[in-house]
Image (cartoon, rainbow, N blue to C red):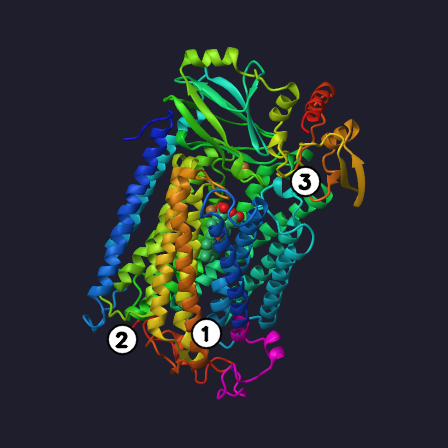
Amino acid sequence: MATAISTEKNFFEIKKGIASWLFTLDHKRIGLMYFYAIISFFLVGVILGLLMRLELIAPGETIVKPTTYNQIFTLHGVIMIFLFIIPSIPAIFGNFFLPIMLGTDDVAFPRLNLLSWWLYVGGAVFALLTLVVGDGPADTGWTFYAPYSVQTGTNVTLSVLAAFILGFSSILTGLNFIVTIHRLRAPGMTFNKMPLFAWSLYATSWIQLLATPIIGITLLMIVAERVFGIGLFDPSIGGDPILYQHLFWIYSHPAVYIMALPAMGIISELIPSFAKRTIFGYKAIAYSSMAIAFVGYFVWGHHMFTSGMSGTARVIFSILTFIVAIPTAVKVFNWVATLYKGSIDVQTPLLYALAFIFQFLIGGLSGLVLAALAADIHVHDTYFVVGHFHYVMFGGTGFAMFGALHYWFPKIWGRMYNKRTANIGFALLTVGFNFLYFPMMILGLMGMPRRYYDYLPRFTDLNVISTVGSWILAIGLIIMLWNLIRAKKTGEKVGRNPWGSISMEWQTKSPPPLENFDKLPELNEGGPYHYKH
Amino acid sequence: MFSEASNFVKGVDTSLAVILGISIFFLIGITVVMIYFVIRYNKKRNPKATNIEHNNTLEILWTVIPTILVLIMFYYGWAGFKPMREVPDDAMVVKAYGQMWQWTFEYDNGKKSDKLVVPKGKAVKLDLISLDVLHALYIPAFRIKEDVVPGKTNFMWFEARKLGEYDVLCAEYCGQRHAYMISKLIVKEQADYDNWYINELGVSTDPPGLSILKQNACISCHSLDGTVLVGPTFKGIWERKQIIIRDGKEIEIVVDKEYMRRSLNKPNDDIVKGFNKGLMISYEDKINEEQLDQIIEYLKTLK
Ligand code: HEM
Ligand SMILES: [Cu+2]
Ligand SMILES: [Cu+2]
């Protein structure tokens, strides 16, 4: 570790000015720049979501025309997937905390890290350009299914290029993390002594590195099809639309684990920190991340159970999908078992972790319905699916991210938020969330298809409940953010370790100095979660 | 337990019930245990935690039991699904065409209907054909759905068990009016069905031009009453002056037979100002000269 750099000043103070941020090589600043960018897009996505819910409060036209609605759900999906949920935890908290938790001073390739951020911004600019140039944002859904995506007059090419560029940002972050984990662990920290958050990022990074190129090339093929009419996916010129679906899901199913694994890593940090005891089944949790990442490559066909695949293919994909559920279930059992005989300090981050477990369970269990061939025939492409993936991505990953934010807030900014207000925000968010999405599951079972601008009158009541839920959720979100923004300026200052955690990042100052540690960090005896009582 | 509208309701609903039943049991069980632990081992009640690294028996149990349970779920899913792929030999075949944004059903005598009428108690096989983009034929009450993929003929089959009218929806997003791509499935007694087949199928009181417009889904995008849908309305269209965009330039034309033919053959070449291209398929080999004349005769009446 370089010794010349002052550890008196924290990483905010050491340099000032906008250029010192935009061109920084400090992983913490890059993490924070991701944070501001990603949270802004999240809020844009939320506003689009609220608009959709408002349109759907009653049958018939409410606030927008059908094409506008279709563009809104496409943009909502693209923003939430590519600009929010895929980067979210790895790019923000992975960047900020992975090096600290490994006891090192930065990621392996700081310049590459900065490049990843700029690629993210570049991709985001392309996505936003679709709003202002040409014939308006794409109206294909975030899946860009051919041949509609080849034929529609809206700005598909630009949207797809945005996703392509964002893919590179993701690949480079994955590469960086893999090398960092292999090369820069503190002396004595073997793989089996590594924090579980690092393990989850390790598994995730391999998916980012290996799967993302597939979506990259697939999206370029869409562009080629639109611009040159090559005949890859559009049957009217000799292509095959099913080929597109295979290619798309070969990436996009593993991408589900890019979204879920880091969240599981967060939960594995939060629970021992607040239960003040060792995690139950460290190895099971660590290795199951790798197992999920691996088996996750072979289940993409479950998105195509109604596309006319052969019966044999459907059976194989169904069974593999069920198998993937098991390592996930094992993790849930381990987290709950970690609460047993703990000495539990119920703080806001733990509440988010508990809500995560509940909602992620609903997301996962509803996934079993979608994995079963007969049941899926009925609920495929209905609101059941919309409910399912929001429970996984938002109720799961989104909530884990909020939990992480409340957990590491005092470390990042050196101040504590008002805990009571944080809990009120949490409560509204959770209640609103479940009112918003649970009715969607029932709507799906009743047979309401997704991507529906308008619906049959018998679906009205549940749609009204869902829309009201979206308002409660919005209030919770405002309270949460307002509380944190206020705390950043005026919150009470905290020391190194306000939660009394033994994880390595709590050994340094809050906020940390430029190269992370003012004194050499010590490995905890007996493993990363071994609390001494 | 279930009112069985089709032969597949039982298989699908059983798999749903098995999976949802086990899921709800686990959801409630895990949540209750979790909340109980948080209360029981609260730091006030339990100031000193105990480190428990792992427990082999427990871990084996909670891997093996879920594995068995998911295999049971798989079984019910497969059992309900398998018959969906096994079409009886004597099934009556109907071609189901999906196109933006209308369903059309063609019977073995070559006649078409915009509703799917079937006899009760007889196996019906649908050959699914798309004329443009992806659609999915979905009959919620019958628990069946299959994508309608251009360039490929998928199929589905069913046997209706109860008289009545059911919704036929589109479950695969197909553009602007996806939510309005709705038809009806009507189940009749065999005798009533035969009567319909002989006396009503393909027979309409509409003028011939209008039937052609209906059968080709023209009116799902071009209204007859002046409302603007996806394309310009047909009301008053004949000999209307219109600004169109051709090769990126605005020009004024009058709607005559030659312009109609151009628009049918190469729908993306001339776009009426204010509308989008890429939405209409070519009807070059779907509408012949005689039919075009009949359409024009009809359009003249729409003043
Ligand atoms: C206030 C928050 C949110 C609301 C009200 C909301 C609402 C909705 C609704 C109503 C749809 C269905 C559109 C349709 O099928 O017609 C939808 C689709 C979607 N949402 Fe959300 N959502 C929210 C947050 C999120 C979050 C946090 C994520 C991801 C992490 C997300 C990801 C998606 C995706 C991927 C789609 C699919 C888009 C498509 O079909 O192409 N949403 N959302
Ligand atoms: Cu998947
Ligand atoms: Cu559709």
Q: Are marks 2 and 1 in contact (CB under 8 Å)?
A: no
Look at the image and give the residue range highlighted in magenta: A2-31
Q: Position of residue B173 (x, y in %)?
A: 54, 40
Tell me the number on the disc at residue A485: 1
Identify which residue is drawn at 46% across, 25% down: B185
Q: For mark 2, does the 10 Å Cα neighbourhood hold few (<14), some (14 to 19), or many (20 or more) residues?
A: some
- Mark 1 — on which chain does it sit? A
Residue B198 part of the magenta segment: no
Label 1: how many Cα within 10 Å (few below 14, some 14–19, many 20+): few
Mark seen at residue B278: 3
Q: Amino acid at mark 1?
A: Ile
Quarter of the figure with the C terminus of chain A:
bottom left
Q: Residue furthest front?
A: B303
Q: Is residue A14 magenta?
A: yes
Disc 2 sits on a residue from what chain?
Answer: A
Residue at 75 percent of width and 28 percent of height: B261
Q: Is ligand 3 within 8 Å of the beta carbon of the residue shown at mark 3? A: no
Res. A532 mark: 2
CA gap, disc 1 and disc 3: 47 Å
